[in-house]
Amino acid sequence: LDEAFKANSAILNTLLTLLNERVFDNGPERQKAPLLVCVAASNERPDTEELDALYDRFLFRREVLPVRDDQVMELLEMVSGTAASAKPPPAQAGALDINRVVQQIEAAMPSVRLPREQQVLLRRLRAEMRDSHQVLVPDRRLVKTAHALRVSAASHARSAVNALDLLAVLPDTFWVNPEERGIIRAWLWENLVPEAEEGPARLLLRSLLTRALEALRATAGEMDDRGGAKEVDVRRAASLVSEAGALRAAVTERRDALRGHIADLERAGEHLWLDPTDAVAAQQALRPVAEERLAMVMRTLTEVASLEKALEGGLEGAVRLGVVERLEERARNEDPPFEERELAMTMREAKAAFDVEKFRLWKRAKKRSEKYEGA
């Protein structure tokens, strides 16, 4: 559809009906249109509400720039009839039937899900474009983009949308003006890799280690009352086993998410929707970040598993106590998971900002930082 925004009102209404409902009015009769894809071109941007409505129906948007100087000769060879690319391609045996492909993807769609992590990224990017760049992504476009992401996953025979689908789709669906495409890509580069969530995990681990050490010192390292430990102390130590198990499960989930992300990046070059240059850039820029975060998660997971194993039993009391003491000392002496602005807070400000456990850890970190600055 060439020069789409030069259409008059009657043609615009026909196009909107055709694009929305896949039907058109042929005189008094409304007929179904076997429309699969509509591609439009324009040398100008829409400047009325009517044209905006048509513009919004085109989910994918691409800006076609003039040919660069280093590509002019290639262009001239194409139109001269001498380039290999100017010759009609030979018929391919077993070429795909587009209708069959569409049917296969439609059949797979019910089993393709949009994971919560990707939903959160969509919500955050939409808010970022609205709040920081005054670009509104309407509900209709958001829903259609989510559908396109699932189609992308289905076309790769996957049951879930991954980060590469977002990188392939969102830079072409979330912008209004072409210059906003770069903003979207930059945001995705910064946010696509799953977070390690190291800070919260380390805080929970430190809390567990502190309480485990207190409980085990009261029982001389035993998990029962055979050594004369009080029942209340034994119960307190035993209750920490389930907490350690819950934390291990949460950290394991982070580990699996990062491992899956790295595996996806290794296959970026196979993504049918992703520009080859973006695929290479994703591997070069995002994989080191993912591997660094995975290493952080693995460190925490190892320590949580060690604590859980020590608390579950099978060790002599003195050995169990020694293991937990070493884990607690290591956690206590590591760099605090607080930012400089948090360490600059007054006691009153920190008490108002943090819960009891985090406030206790803040005081310890504050004391160490002041000791370091004094030295």
Image (cartoon, grey):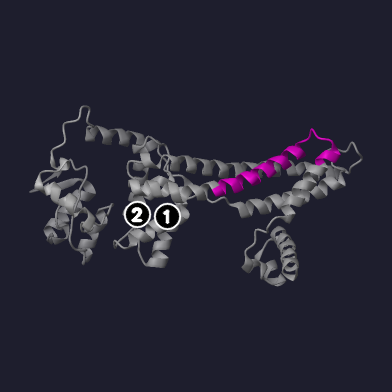
Where is residue 374? Give x, y as percent: 75, 70
Whether 305 is among the magenta residues is: yes
Residue bearing mark 1:
188
Q: Quadrant of residue 264?
A: top left
Residue bearing mark 2:
171
Q: Residues within 10 Å of mark 1 (few under 14, many from 20)?
A: some
Q: Quadrant of residue 303?
A: top right
Contact between marks 2 and 1 (CB within 8 A): the answer is yes
Kindly report the distance in space between the C-alpha atoms of the residues bearing marks 2 and 1: 9 Å
In this rendered view, identify the residue nearer to me: 182 or 124: 182
Q: Could you tell me which secondary element the residue under label 1 belongs to?
A: helix
Point out the stretch of residues depicted in magenta: 292-320
Which residue occupies 73% across, 66% down? 372
Image-based side of 51 in relation to 210, left or right: left
In this rendered view, identify the residue nearer to me: 330 or 234: 330
Image-based side of 250 in relation to 365, left or right: left
Which residue occupies 70% across, 55% down? 334
Task: Using the image, determine if residue 119 lies above or below residue 98.
Answer: below
Query: Which comes sooner in the sequence, label 2 or label 1?
Result: 2
Please state which amino acid type lies under the numbered disc 2.
Answer: Pro
Q: Residues within 10 Å of mark 2 (few under 14, many from 20)?
A: many
Image-based side of 356 in relation to 155, left or right: right
Where is residue 169? Give x, y as percent: 34, 49
Which residue occupies 16% across, 32% down? 90
Where is residue 323? Give x, y as percent: 78, 42
Q: Mark yes or no: residue 244 visible.
A: yes
